[in-house]
Image: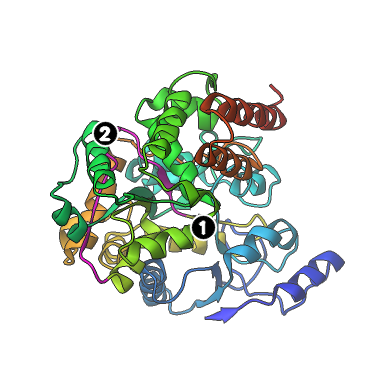
Amino acid sequence: MKRRNFTTLLTASALGAAAAPTLAACGGSGGGSGDGTSLVIWHYENEDSAMGQAWALAQEIFEEKHPEVTVTVEKQTFEQLQKNATIVLTGDDVPDLMEYNKGNSTAGQLASQGLIDPFTEIATENGWDQKLSESLQTTARYDEFGLMGSGDWFGLPNYGEYVYVFYNQRMFEEAGVAVPNTLEEFEDVLQTFVDKDIIPLAGAGAEYPAGQLWYQLALAHADRDFVDAYQLFDGDVDWAADPILAGAQRFADWVEKGYLAGDSAGLTAEDMGTAFISGTYPIMFSGSWWFGRLVAEMEDEWGQFLFPGADLTIGSSGNLWVVPANAANKDLAYEFMEITMSQEVQDLLGQKGGLPVAGDTSVIEDDKTREMTENFTAVNDSDGLAFYPDWPVAGFYDQVVSAMQSLINGSKTPQQAMAELGEAYATGRTDLTGE
């Protein structure tokens, strides 16, 4: 796959001139006036990843159906598109279809600025609104302010991601503990390891993992109304009460009891992952994005289970297919999107370790891959995806990291840490909504 030169593109966009020959286009509802011989796709998946392999199959299917169309796939990086999309998409030299990050400050921003097209009618005609659960649709739809969860469809997710518990089977067997079914049983497992002078949880306070643990502990006391209020501003959020305070208090208690290392405030996600892989800790709470690496690198046998005692799980759709407003070949883009939702492509995605939104788990041969996918399917079927703690407002990621570090090192009480987070949240919410 070809890599796009973003420096050239940015210069051309700023000058209002094309840096490369005009792309051929097709007729129909697409912008531009080309001759129907080109479909340009930008994405940032590696060729050997589950998504990369599934989308390569989608390309083969598309090309068999449209031998007259030249499909050009240009590989970007996540960082390139994250930083430069709002500039690049104002010009005419844009792709017909693009992978982009979901959320208010990413796809929502492009939608509110008119840089990507809505396609609600297309979603309905293709039945995407029936294939995707409500929680998966949340990241696909944006209102006039770019807030996710309502309004038109501006993106299509065709895979998912979620956060769950990985555990070292050898260490569980040696400690004589089993996979817990409730939060209380989980705490009993953690205490058993502490009694054996083993810190049970791999942790990372310098990046996202600690915040995700706090949020999951809060979700153990929460329902969908809380998630809608917290993530979608559909209601008020009380930062001095449960479930938020319950999650923070439990997080602080776990640190005090030795379930989480006191020096983990300065550790990164990579530190956490490598420590778990090496067998230093028996348990890691993190995302499905670690799955492939554990398969490749971990020597001990390991297993997985959903966080016990909660009906809600951290996770969301994966990245989105979006169609730039200035795209030349929108009809072909929508057709390619539909192919990525087909049974054939979704099943391959599952077989390769992705998390399909419409796949058949029975065709997955590998036991671990099938279990991961079945667990995600169960969460998805129950509309249990609760998104991520730093999503609601701009800059909240750094605030959450700081709050978790203060809880780990004991410099703030749960009440103090949540009060500071609540102030940042309220300010960001007002900036976005005016309320």
Disc on the earlier residue, 2 or 1: 2
Residue 155 visible within the image = no
Residue 315 located within the stretch drawn in magenta: yes
> Is there CB contact under 8 Å for labels 2 and 1?
no
Residue 360: give x, y in percent of width and height.
Answer: 21, 56
What residue is disc 1 on? 268
Task: Determine the residue positioned at 54% across, 69% down.
Answer: 41
Residue 9 located within the stretch drawn in magenta: no
- Splitting the image into 4 quarters, where does residue 20 fall? bottom right
Task: Determine the residue positioned at 33% across, 36% down.
Answer: 383
Marker disc for residue 414: none
- The colouring scheme, among rainbow, by chain, secondary structure or one colour, is rainbow
Marker disc for residue 183: 2
Left or right: residue 325 versus residue 404 is right
Amino acid at dot 2: Leu
Q: Is residue 47 above or below residue 189?
A: below
Q: Categorize mark 2 by other alpha carbons within 10 Å: few (<14), some (14-19), many (20+).
A: some
Amino acid at dot 1: Thr
Residue 111: give x, y in percent of width and height.
Answer: 63, 45
Q: Which residues are magenta?
A: 299-318
Q: Is residue 110 above or below residue 241?
A: below
Cα distance, mark 2 to mark 1? 26 Å
Residue 53 visible within the image = yes
Task: Determine the residue positioned at 58% across, 69% down.
Answer: 77
Q: Secondary structure at mark 2?
A: helix
In the displayed image of the protein, which residue is found farthest to the right?
A: 15
Left or right: residue 367 versus residue 129 is left
Residue 46: give x, y in percent of width and height.
Answer: 46, 73
- Splitting the image into 4 quarters, where does residue 402 fall? top right
Q: Secondary structure at mark 1?
A: loop
